[in-house]
Image (tube, helix red, strand yellow):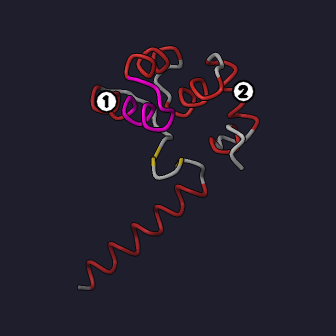
Amino acid sequence: KAGTAQKIALNSFSSSVMVKLHKVYGNLMVDLRATNAKLYRRALRLTMMASGANEAQADETLLACGYRVKVAIVMLKCGLRAHQAEALLDAHAGDLRAALGER
């Protein structure tokens, strides 16, 4: 019982830290850079879910931005090129929601 309570407490703590660090968009952990096949599949799913893009659009966009999910989401939702999306994210300290104008 104590182990379960400890696990719940640590999960809550780590989740709140991820939110504060702008690594979460909705219920998705989007601050991901795909460096292997497993992470690529996850990045593809996250990009599709967060942006509403189809698989082909998400795949093409991830390729164009070096497989960085946050950049891909900004590109798809705002119609920007990779360098423009990066600049927008940088201007908002990596906060995806703020970069998309959702705050």
Q: Residue at x 35, y 73 (%)?
A: 8
What distance separates the C-alpha of mark 2 from that of mark 1?
A: 26 Å
- Magenta segment boundaries in residue numbering: 43-54
Q: Which mark is residue 81?
A: none
Image spot of residue 43 (x, y percent): 40, 32
User: Which residue carries the number 2 mark?
Assistant: 87
Count of labels shown? 2
Image spot of residue 3 (x, y percent): 26, 79
Image spot of residue 21 (x, y percent): 60, 52
Instruction: Tell me the chief SS of the magenta region.
Output: helix
Q: Residue at x 72, y 30 (%)?
A: 88
Amino acid type assigned to the residue bearing label 1 in the image: Arg
Image spot of residue 99 (x, y percent): 69, 38
User: Which residue carries the number 1 mark?
Assistant: 41
Residue located farthest toward the left when viewing the structure as drawn: 1
Pointer 2 and pointer 1: residues touching (CB < 8 Å)? no
**Near-viewer residue (91 or 97):** 97
In what quadrant of the picture does the N terminus appear?
Answer: bottom left
Amino acid type assigned to the residue bearing label 2 in the image: Ala
Q: Secondary structure at mark 1?
A: helix
Determine if the magenta segment contains residue 74.
Answer: no
Query: Which of pointers 2 and 1 lies earlier in the amino acid sequence?
Result: 1
Asked if residue 74 is positioned above or below residue 30 in the image, the reply reads above
Q: Residue at x 62, y 41 (%)?
A: 96
Residue located farthest toward the right when viewing the structure as drawn: 91
Asked if residue 64 is positioned above or below residue 25 in the image, the reply reads above
